[in-house]
Amino acid sequence: MRVRPSMHSTSGSNWMLLCSSAGGRKAFCKTFSRLVWRAAFSSLLFLAGSHAIFARSDGAPLSPTNIFAPVSTPAHSIYRLSLFELEILAAIFVVVFSLLAFAVVKFRERKQQDETEPPQIYGSNQMELAWTVLPVLIVVVLFLSTAQVIHRVQDARAPDGAIDVTVVAHQFWWEYRYPQFGLVAANELHVPVSDPSHPTPAYIHLLSADVDHSFWVPRLAGKTDLIPNHPNNTWIDPHETGLFLGQCAQFCGTQHAKMLLRVYVQSRGDFDRWVHDQQQDAAPASPDVAAGSALFISKACFACHTIRGTIAAGKVGPDLTHLMSRDTIGSGSVPNTPENLQKWVRDPATFKPGTLMPAQDLTDQELGQIVAYLMTLH
Amino acid sequence: MASEAVPLTIRKSPLAVVYEWLGTADHKKIGLLYIVYALLFLVVMGIEAVLMRIQLAHANSTFLSPQVFNRLFTLHGTTGVFFVAMPILVGFGNYLVPLMIGARDMAYPRLNAFGFWMTAFGGLLLYGSFFAGNSIAQAGAAPDFGWFAYAPLTSTAFSPGHSTDYWNLAILLGGVGSIAGGINFVATVLTMRCPGMTLSKMPLLAWMNMVLGGLILVTISPLTAAQLMLMADRYVGAHFFDVQAGGSVVMWMHFFWIFGHPEVYVLIIPCFAFISEIVPVFSRKAIFGYPAMVAATVCIGFVSLGVWAHHMFAVGMPSYGNAFFVLTTMVVAVPTGIKIFNWLATLWGGRIRFATPMMFAVGFLFQFLVGGLTGIMLATAPFDWQLTNSYFVVAHFHYVIVGGIMFSIFGAFYYWFPKMTGRMLSETLGKWHFWIFLIGFHLTFDSLHIPGLLGMPRRIYTYEAGRGWEIWNMIASIGVIFQGAAVLIFVYNVVKSYIAGKPAGNDPWDAWTLEWATTSPPPEYNFAVVPEVRSRRPLWDIKHPEDPDWKYE
């Protein structure tokens, strides 16, 4: 194999030699400036496109759990930071990918070429310095903007007028305590809408009764874990009313997948009404559901569940005092209808196999009576 | 009568062959044992993935129960990290390092064999859990708590059967095996290089396997420690992770991720080595910036030890703690990016030959770039508060593990199979393999980023309809068909070529490192005469005596 004397270069102004096989400095610079324009254009296009796809202000048509459709300040801060970062990363991708694509096309071995080896280039101090310094600068910029958002979100102080909520995560349901109002609810979190000029955020204290869980409602905030013996805090200040969805985001056992989150953001008036209703004890059982009410005790439902106003004070399962005020049962997994309630009470594994509530050993008549009683718990 | 040389054929009985392989301490045979073992488990992992993707193709599917699904994803991850990726990479390293440095074997051949068998038994123990009986609590014995086995899910209270114990012991064994391998790599590279091969004249694969060895030694220990603590909690009344007695669940996370993050560098560094050998040969150029490549690798090795808590951004560390790990994680991206630029510059101005190894290498470059960029998104803690524990992370790490590691392993197969067996793999089948795998990979893992951005958490056996996730999950599941088909083509290629492939000769690729200076396959002693080298590419010097490397390095 005949060998053309190859150009060996280690340092010095050798980056130009890289271009010599590309057909000259002119071709390289032309390619590079074309790349820069292409990068700028593509990243703009990418942003516009992603805006169109993801960032519609309602978000709902695409997904109710779209992280790019924030309605609360923490989620907004994250969204703005992510857009800034995506622009930078898109530009990097376009530049590097274009170089790669260009290289694999331009420098293919052609059949007609003689069998010599191309110039052997061992390195170039300038290029290597440049592509070290530039990434370091990008890292500095990204780090500083990130640190700012971390501080702003994590170290925010609760203003007066903030609602305090303590979330206790269980396998596989959510308990909500409102210490300011003396009420305990389950599975459906209610908070008032927050006016940006006069914020009334909900400050959420996160605890766990058993294993690790994570509270994730994408449109409201990033996720924060609930870890036994390691209390955490997060906050939300939704600017819009509505129902916002999420689910547990840290594997917690068999039914992790159906530990769903439902956050109802209400006008202040509606929220106050809800609080008032939830604070009431259950009305005494009327005579036509007296049988069911008695079965609730004799069949040991009270051992796990609380119904305030009765002797049932169990803490293992959700508080049922206002069960019928909820849209769903099974922590969001099925709608709260009479048939679903029947199926659930007979055997929760119908909907959530592996849930910790065992199948109840009830005759059809007993089942009907208990469900009839439960349906009076508004 | 003229005397003719008659080749002496030694026929071994089948039993003798089996005994030879079971008792071998030869680095090449051990390397092949590791590789074949890993390939078998790769198929198992693939089946687990297929089952999971069938379940996830539709919302509210009931194809699999949650209990089975949770076991599948736990075993898929655990098998993939400990019994596929690590063995196959250690296997290639074992095969190649002594050949590339002109040595006869690794520094500790019997330790090497010990390491393989420990790893092998670990994997068998893990899967033995399927055959174990249910405990009194009717809990199955196969692990079902995710490959990172977070406390307190693994405590006796929440995992009443023996699933934790199988997981613990299997990985403990595997860890011991890895440590044996790590010791060997470091000792071999430091002490057994042939005359003239200073550290700065070693092939990059040797450097990277040395860094790999050191990293293994540092990173497996915290995992082993955590596992011993977990065993103590479960059996002798310790309370390391028992929160009701003052223990800490977060401590498990720290210990696990101090292992877990460097572990992913343990997985990728050998792949960097493969790419650093393949790209120059098929571009017909020396690697661009050898000193920087070495420095970047060593730097990655060190810095990777300081980034672990980026897996814990949502756990509730204080803001300055989160910020620190954002910084270190972004810093480790710099040397990694440098390597990509160096590979690009190696391609640049070359004469690129698109044989199958090079196609996989170019695929690696593209996919590793994308995986690295999504990694930067995950390094940004606030963004990570949305993305962590979602399908975005699943897409990111599969991009790097399948799109990066798996692609480079396939490239390494096509490149070194001729050396290992004396036969070429079919180029035609190789190209089919590449293109079909590429299509399947992108169908699956490009799609999976989107449900993550739309709020889909990971490790869920089913999901709600109406969240915009269904179509992407369906596309991802379809991609699996292509990947499966491609792997079958690959297996067929390997078997067919092993039996009837084109003879390879010593140096089918016109390459430059020492392994190509001996026969294919090499004799047990590797080199009849100890080689002496003067440059990083000894075969280039031989092939180009008027223009040798040592004049210019």
Image: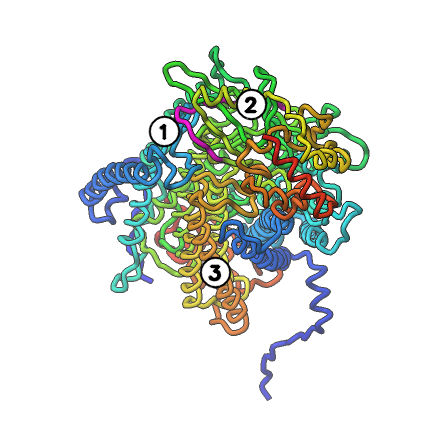
Q: Mark 1: which secondary structure?
A: helix
Q: Mark 3: which secondary structure?
A: helix
For residue B12, say whether it is visible: yes
Name the chain letter of the residue that bears numbered label 1.
A
Q: Mark 2: which secondary structure?
A: helix
Q: Which residue is mark 1?
A: A138
Please provide percent x and percent y for residue B534.
46, 48
Label annotation for residue A277: 2
Give the extent of the magenta segment.
A230-245
Name the chain letter of the residue that bears numbered label 2.
A
Q: Nearer the viewer, mark 3 or mark 1?
A: 3
Alpha carbon distance from label 3 to label 1: 40 Å
Q: Which residue is mark 3?
A: B481
Front residue of B255 and B275: B255
Q: Is residue A113 left or right of residue B79?
A: left
Q: Are marks 3 and 1 on the same chain?
A: no
Amino acid on which the number 2 mark rests in the picture:
Asp
Question: Relative to B109, is A288 above or below?
Answer: above
